[in-house]
Image: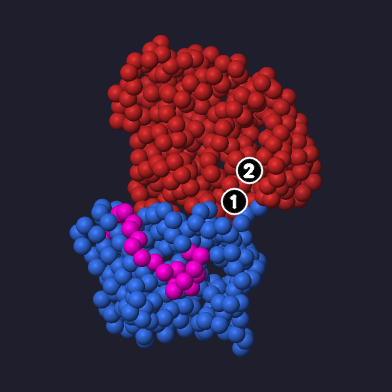
Amino acid sequence: MEFGLFMELSVPRPWTADSERQVYENALEQVRLADELGFDYVWAVEHHFLEEYSHCSGPDIFLAACAAQTSRIRVGHGVVACVPQYQSPIRVAERAAVLDIISGGRLELGTGRSATWPELSGFGANPDETKKTWDEFVRVIPKMWMQERFSWNGRMFSMPERAILPKPLQKPHPPMWVAVTSPGTELDAADRGLGCLGLSPGGFADSEKKVANYRRRIEVCDPVGAFVNDKVLTVNFLSCHEDGDLGRRNGLKVASMFSYMASQLLSAKEVLPTHSYPSEGLLPALRRESGSPGDAAKSFKGVTMGTPDDVADAIAAWENVGFDGINFIHQFMEVLPQQYVLDSMRLFAEEVMPRFKAATAPTSPAARRPVGAGVA
Amino acid sequence: MPLAGSLDIRPLLGAAPDVVLEDRELKVDDVDILQILYEVRVDDREALVPPALNPTIPPVVSFLVYRARDSVFGPFALAQVRLTARSGVRPRAFLISARCDNPALSEVLAGSWGFRVSPGEIALRRFHDRVDCTVRESGGVILQASLVDPVPVTGHDVQYPPGMHLARVQRGGVSKPRIVQVDSEYEFRRADRGRPELTSFDPGAWGDARLVPDIGVSASFAACDMTIANVRYICNPDIPAAEGTEKVSDA
């Protein structure tokens, strides 16, 4: 199993001149520790306008700082909004390549399309188009990385032949992923040979079915890049403490706050009748976990909170479902003291991680399945 | 921290309907529903909804208009102005006020579900290129809105969150301020969406002059059978819904 940190960089009110700096400093300290402890990934989201919930609008810059302060952990640039009103695919390819170079070839690129009304309307994006534009982004980005000069005549954008520079350090290119919240996106990931970056907690049975479908489908995929990334990661809340009650209580603080804050954002689906967003992203899963209309999300089955044994049991269950790893939301809105967060990570790394770290480590692109291998 | 409502409900209680909770639902066939959504630009979002609810980011005002050709109360049209909100993590719409052209139905809507409703003249006209709605009160236009360029979608694409209606509810022989959660079910026959167009809106006439629409979000028109369900939940308006929600059947 692989383990990562999932950074939203949420900044609670009241905001002071120093609030955002403090959140970024805390996050960087967590990343430095994660690097020492053997965590595999740090992922940083891309969000815009989502006050308090996420102040991470320049994730590549944050990740550049992470890369500069670490030596081993892989930097997950994701989920990058593959929406042309947010940014051109050229800029995504360029910036990601820079990040890959300065991190010494540690980039993972997560792709997605945004799901909130504030973001989509803020950029003037058409929600009906985002699935289509995402598809064009993921097809062109690996070509931009691999071809010395690149030209394109597409539906979303076109460009004359140009050298898109720099090229990433990893050859043939960094691993690519897609964020999976809407039902069926795991199949989109499989068909394109992309790793599955699960962002919504769900039940074991539902997850098992999705992972199985993904595994079956990716065997016969037509990858957008030069190799197949067939990993499936899920997301969970981490709070590990010798006192299990304290661990669970603190973990639930993070989970509840995350649910509350996420739910206040208007999803595109909620206000715009569109086929393009068949679900409200991660919100329905969180809402299913609440008991009554007034409840915040409660602990869901398989939550990685409590004593090291509790956390290990939960991870084992997710491993049995078929996941290759878990990205942890270990802090949100600074509801936990920084020292608790660091101690929780340390305890997890000492007591839990070794039970799942027999032989695996994030693999370099060259070690992953090249195009054609395993294709029926 | 999550934004929490801070609306002082005291000034609103004078005009809040008295509700007697009883086992009652209202089924209406063949209802046309126009919903038009606009973002609201306001400095103090929290002050738009009571402490029981959380505002959304951004706040969105909904103009929701029903027209039924028949019902047990006869034909009616009902226009509501609602504001998107949350009860805990769940999507809701806080009712600002409503207008109805059927007095008998109005009485039931107020007394059973806490609709803050007063008489109004409501016209809803569907054309192939647009759907127009006009609401008049005392002869003056207080809402004029349209859906322009309809294109078909499915009923699954259209959402009407449950209403949250401020009322005085009889509990244990005492009248208490409560928010009544009004759940409705819809069986869609068709649905369209289009571009929203707002020609006229008098927010003060509807009960909250701060609801100045900003940018248009969406417009939808649906034909469906509708049931306004028995009230299942009420909540104390003064405290967060997580703490103040009561299941009616538990009383």
Whether residues under marks 1 and 2 lie with C-beta atoms below 8 angstroms apart, the answer is: yes
| Residue A119 magenta | no
Q: Name the chain letter of the residue that bears numbered label 2.
A: A
Q: Which amino acid does label 2 sit on?
A: Ser
Q: In which quarter of the image is residue A342?
A: top right
Residue underneath mark 2: A10
Q: Which amino acid does label 1 sit on?
A: Met
Horizontal and vertical percent position of residue A120: 44, 44
Using residue A267 as the reference point, say whether residue A341 is left or right of it. Answer: right
The N terminus of chain A sits in image quarter: top right
Residue underneath mark 1: A261
Residue sitting at 29 percent across and 83 percent down?
Answer: B74
Residue at the far bottom in the pictured view: B173
Horizontal and vertical percent position of residue A158: 32, 25
Circle 2 packing at 10 Å, graded few (<14), some (14-19), many (20+), is many
Residue sitting at 37 percent across and 43 percent down?
Answer: A126
Q: In this picture, which residue range is highlighted in magenta?
A: B186-211
SS for dot 2: loop
Horizontal and vertical percent position of residue B72: 32, 83
Q: Which mark is residue B201?
A: none
The C terminus of chain A sits in image quarter: top left
Chain drawn blue in the picture: B
Using residue A23 as the reference point, say whether residue B136 is left or right of it. Answer: left
Chain drawn red in the picture: A
